[in-house]
Amino acid sequence: MKLSRVVVLICIPVLFASVGFENDDYYLFPIRPGERNYLSGNFCELRSSHLHAGLDIKIGGVVGSPVHATADGYINRIKISYGGYGNAIYIQHPNGTISAYAHLHEFNNKIQAYVKQAQYQKKSFTIELFPQKNELAVKRGEVIGKAGNSGSSGGPHLHFEIRDANQQPMDPLKFGFTEIVDNVRPYVRRIALTTLNEDSRINGQFGRFEFSLKDKNGRYVVDEPIAVKGTVGVEVASFDKATGVRNVYGVKETTLTLDGQSQFHCDMGKFAFSQTKNIHVHTNYEERYRQNRTFYKLYVDDGNTLPFYNTNAQKGKVTIDDDQVHQATITLADINGNKSQVDFTLQGQSETDKVLNTRYFNKPYSTQNYHVRENILQLFAPVDKNPEGIYQRKLATFFSNRRAFEEPPAYVVNDVAVYLWNLNQGIPDSVDMCGDVSQLPIKVRVPSQSAFSFYQPQMNVTFPKSALFDTLFLQMDHQMEAGRELFRLHQGNVPLRQSMQVLLKPRQFPEGPRDKTSVYRIDAKGDLGYEGGDWKNNNISFRTRSFGDFILEVDTIAPVITPLSISSSRLRFKIEDVTSGIRNYEVYVDDEWLLMHYDYKRDLIWSDRLDDSKPLTGKVTLRVRDMVGNENVFSRVI
């Protein structure tokens, strides 16, 4: 019997794959099928931390629109969570594909009864269930629930996916849904070019430079040639739109050509969920972090394993090593074939002046006088002119491995000397520019493809294998700031694929109990985000997927409970915690566990009785705990 079951499981995907997979009539649109619909998000749209895996379908700004099963099948997974997809249903279809419906407001009566029974058995609001084939069968067009705003949704809508037999999401619009109308071409805001090695230059300089565009009826142009020497990468800031809506979407297809030859082609087809973090190297992560602007890279950066690309031998990078004029074109297209084009000219420049006067000046991103780009340290220093108006070029002395290296500036631009130092030849701890000494916090070179640990007097950090997308020149610093001990672990403009382990060794401790003292990350606005941590002696360790500034903070304040409705038919409370956040909650009525739904965006919990005919009577006890164990208890008799 066991052998027979194994044979059936192996054969099913083969049979599934041959049934209606590309048939435009196989799938029904899940919201108002046959009527005009609108999207707030499309497939592979670039979100803050992931590629969007489906369509976000508008429902008019209010919850409650009926959600229809897109095809025959059976529900093989149900998941309810505070964040993420919230209330979600997954349907297995006979052709091998799976459809997903997320952020639901509620399920239909049959599904809701099935889920509620399991929640009461496990005494848990959050739950994940895997029904068998004969338990929850559905027909094409059947209403399986109502669209809503549960989980991490930013507003009422339905998130809808179609996945292949390997659980890889595909663009649902490729199946010919006529409910979505789009005759609007993609828009382009700007392009950017960036140098990709120490000897490359753009308009005579090293760094990244953005260029404005003029729109000429769908054909965008850069007004003047861009001087290029060496190997550079091209980026584009663009977005798509659709007819009748103001929302912006991701661009499906992008092509870069040079002198008519394709250098890079990206077609956003299906992808594996394990690859979704590659969005951080598909786009310019530093620009998204620094200015909240999204630029697509038109080259495949190190660590990028997305399957979307077809490139030249340099993975889309462009090398100009002559003095000739080269014509470059970027073509952008959506899934309906609407296209836009960007034309710009690259002027080869085999030799560049050492003294430049240009409006394109690559300045450091902060008050620092240095910037690390890839493996190149870029230093900026003001220069003076002699009485004849000639620049006095300072020699910079780099101190590395107890040796001193004198370097002239790579070039001077707008009265600023720019020095370039290849960090692969050594990591300097300081630089002396004519008596002006700068201490540098770059500590060590961290490889991207192996586990690595680094120990310092104030903190230790351990990277698991493949935590980094690319080699990292790790910056670490420790200082007192506004009476608090600040631990600076690199900069937040570098992405991580996996969490790293950090051990802090504080020299002073905030006043308060040690078990209520945790690590918090300071964001760009100065707000604190709870990271947690476990104490061992006087050190605290925690895991995080973000670089940045960390401090210790004490939380001794219990969560706040505000009763909103207490009756025999319903309980409703607001629960809040402003420091570490809510960890868990539980409600008992006369010692019987009561299911409470939770919407963390509104800080609301509300009851859902197992038997609606049985009134709530007796002693109600609500316990709410925060992330460090502070507890508040509310009691009342109904």
Image (cartoon, rainbow, N blue to C red):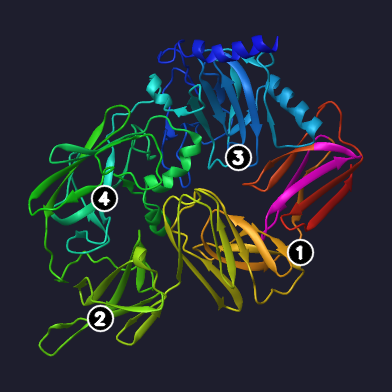
Q: Give the amino acid at mark 2.
A: Leu
The extreme left residue here reads: 324
Q: Which label's residue is closer to the chain start, 3 or 4? A: 3
Report if residue 432 lies within the magenta region. no
Residue 79 coordinates in the image, percent (x, y) = 64, 31
Q: Which disc is residue 233 wearing?
A: 4
Q: Tell whether label 1 touches label 3 (CB within 8 Å).
A: no
Q: Nearer the viewer, mark 2 or mark 3?
A: 2
Of the two numbered discs 3 and 1 in the rendering, the one whose residue sits closer to the viewer: 1
Dot 4 lies on which element?
A: strand
Q: Earlier in the sequence, mark 4 or mark 1?
A: 4
Percent position (x, y) of residue 224? 12, 54
Dot 3 crowding, Cα within 10 Å, few <14, some 14–19, many 20+: many
Mark 3 vs mark 4, CA separation in Å? 38 Å
Judge depth for marks 4 and 1 and give the one in front: 4
Cα–Cα gap, marks 4 and 1:
49 Å
Residue drawn at 27 percent across, 35 percent down: 185
- Which residue position is annotated with label 2? 395
What secondary structure is the magenta-colored segment mainly?
strand
Amino acid type indicated by mark 3: Gly
For badge 1, the amino acid type reads Asp
Residue denoted by label 3: 151
Give the SS element for disc 2. Answer: loop
**Between residues 412 and 585, which one lies in front from this camera angle?**
412
